[in-house]
Image (cartoon, rainbow, N blue to C red):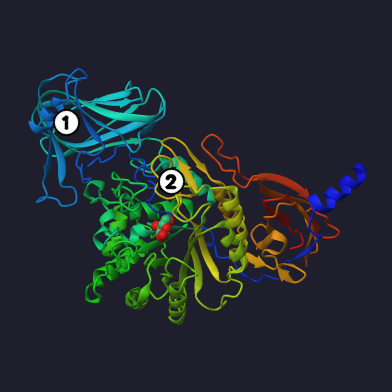
Amino acid sequence: MKKIYIIALCLFGINAFAQKKIVVDVPNKVSEIQPTMWGVFFEDINMGADGGIYAELIKNRSFEFAKPLMGWNIEYPAEAKKEVIVKLRHEGEILVQNRMDKTSANPRYLTVTVNNTQKGELGLSNEGFKGMGFKSGLRYDFSVLARVITGSVKMHIELLNAKKEVIGSTLVTPNTKEWSKIESSFNALASEPKGTFRIWFEGTGVVDLDMISLFPSDTWKGRKGGMRADMIQLLADMKPGFVRFPGGCIVEGFDLNNRYQWKKTLGPIEERQLIMNRWNIEFTHRPAPDYFQTFGLGFFEYFQLCDDIGAAPLPILNCGMACQFNSAEVVPLDQLQPYIDDALDLIEFANGDVSTKWGKTRADMGHPAPFNLTMMGIGNENWGPQYVERLKIFTKAIKAKYPTMKIVNSSGIDPESRIFQHLNTELRAMNADIIDEHYYNKPEWFLKNASRYDSYDRNGSKVFAGEYAAQSVQTVSPNNKNTWQCAMSEAAFMTGLERNAAVVSMASYAPLFAHADGWQWTPDLIWVDNLRSYGTPNYYVQKLYSNNKGTHVLPITESGSTIAGKDSLYAAAAWDKNANEVIIKVVNVSEKAQNHELSLAGVKKLDPKAKTFVMQKDNLNEVNSFENATNVSPAEQDITVDVKKKTINLSLPAKSFIVYRVKVLDK
Ligand code: AHR
């Protein structure tokens, strides 16, 4: 009885599918896989930049938010009554001044007046971006632009824990009549995930303050005023082929005034004019009234990041149209030139000799060597005849001056819509270099579309799968989760992208980052709080693809057909010419385990030892979390190759994604 049960289990439980003979035709290099194939999409959404990778801890450091003191609190002795605030504000002890005739980029500053004031009587505190993360023993760099009007005012700088206890402090005293930067570094004496910052003023006098700033010292590459190292490390670990920046809808803006203008993101940070982040007002169910773009992280820093992590830069520029979900403003064609100039000047900024205007700007910011820009996007999710007519003007101007620059073109928002069909046909007729397709859809859509590109013209425009993510509930639902089901369906879909690398030259999941207390959009690839960060199951899928990219597509077939959904199986194979390895990716989305034989045809000698990276979960709803960051992540395992038969056994658990790496020794 027991024996019969075991046989039945083998037949129906462990391998409910007939054993297949799967073949990888190793000598047959079908097409190249571009080094840019797997990249990342960055946008300042979900507190991705301000409050995210940009490590500034002070919110509204320049008092330029719509409400000048948003994020700040005026501090007074605990025993004082509420009326004290009114007194302080109205009698001018803390006064917001506006010098817009002198500078439109950063007009506001504070004037603080004290009169025989003791420490603890008048202060300012800042709540940070959903609190501030402090690490015990770490150095924090405080700075402020200040000038003394009269007298002498001491500033007691303090880090506070959630109980409002002081866990770090320093003292600075402004002492110049002209604006100057005062800096002081000091250590936090305890860790705190939800800290705040406070200044007590002491003395008699009047002082002006602006750009009140606090950075941790453990930034990426230790750069002062830099980026959060843990978040960038997660990106670097992916070895992305490119970084798309700065978005996303943020490129378009709510209206044209709110569009992303890269030239305003360069130079000294106090001269970078902030604007409202368009995600501030997008979702009524996720309001973010304190979400602004300070541009402390600007285009120079994005290019530098690409350089740091070996990724090709892919900036996306506004095409003269605001977000078509919002104001849908367009700039009249006879006023498009400044937008075109932005594109041409950006190429000079990235690649130009230091003797050129914009090349010199780059050099002055610290990077005389070019950033090697080879591609740029014109428009994000734009469509319609207005887009096409603007795009044609951009394309003509860019190609006339920079014939080899590749242009990424938008194909709208929904690759199954009539808008897409129409636009895609037009763009292909224009011989568009690269067409950007976006898909936010249910996991089933991803499985169904694993063959999407099998029939695309190999000689036509290339495809950039520029934004995609499986949605566990539905697009923009706040209940979407980064489940294993979503990640696994993306892994299955990506076999189709890789198999069609002749057509698909780039792909990126979106959005990239989300702060647990400050997000607007879910799902997202990487989640963070003030001190911690973790990759989702989707992150590990992306990372496995990117770290196991290969250089050429190899045919992987079963009975001569591609493996794209039959019996719930999806597969792709690649050759890595640098490692002499065959890389096989197999996804089994079925409820049952499967066992198949894979033969590596056309090779003489194989290394008997091979490696696999296995992602598997029985429960499709499993997720990662701060507490269990690698719950769904790859496990590395060794397998044995049958060197005589030149086969490996594909032992595929139910609901699994496995990457195999087999070394060829006869090359
Ligand atoms: O990734 C989030 C948003 O989705 C992007 O900003 C936009 O391009 C798309 O609609």
Q: Residue 39 location, x and y as percent?
A: 50, 57
Label drawn at residue 514: 2
- In the rendered image, which quarter is residue 599 located in? bottom right
Asked whether disc 2 touches disc 1, contact meaning CB atoms under 8 Å apart, the reply is: no
- In the rendered image, which quarter is residue 649 located in? bottom right
Q: Indicate left or right for 384 with 235 as reference.
A: left
Badge 1 amino acid = Pro
Q: Viewer-proximal residue, 412 or 373? A: 412
Whether 33 is drawn above or below 65: the answer is below
Q: Residue at x 73, y 56 (%)?
A: 663
Rendered-image quarter of ligand 1: bottom left
Q: Residue at x 54, y 62 (%)?
A: 37
Q: Residue 623 location, x and y as percent?
A: 56, 43
Can residue 580 be seen in this snapshot? no
Q: Indicate left or right for 353 with 428 as reference.
A: left
Q: Residue at x 72, y 45 (%)?
A: 637
Picture quarter with the N terminus: top right
Q: Residue 221 location, x and y as percent?
A: 42, 42
Q: Label 1 crowding class (10 Å Cα cut-off): few <14, some 14-19, many 20+?
A: many
Label drawn at residue 174: 1
Of the image marks 2 and 1, the number of the one nearer the N terminus: 1
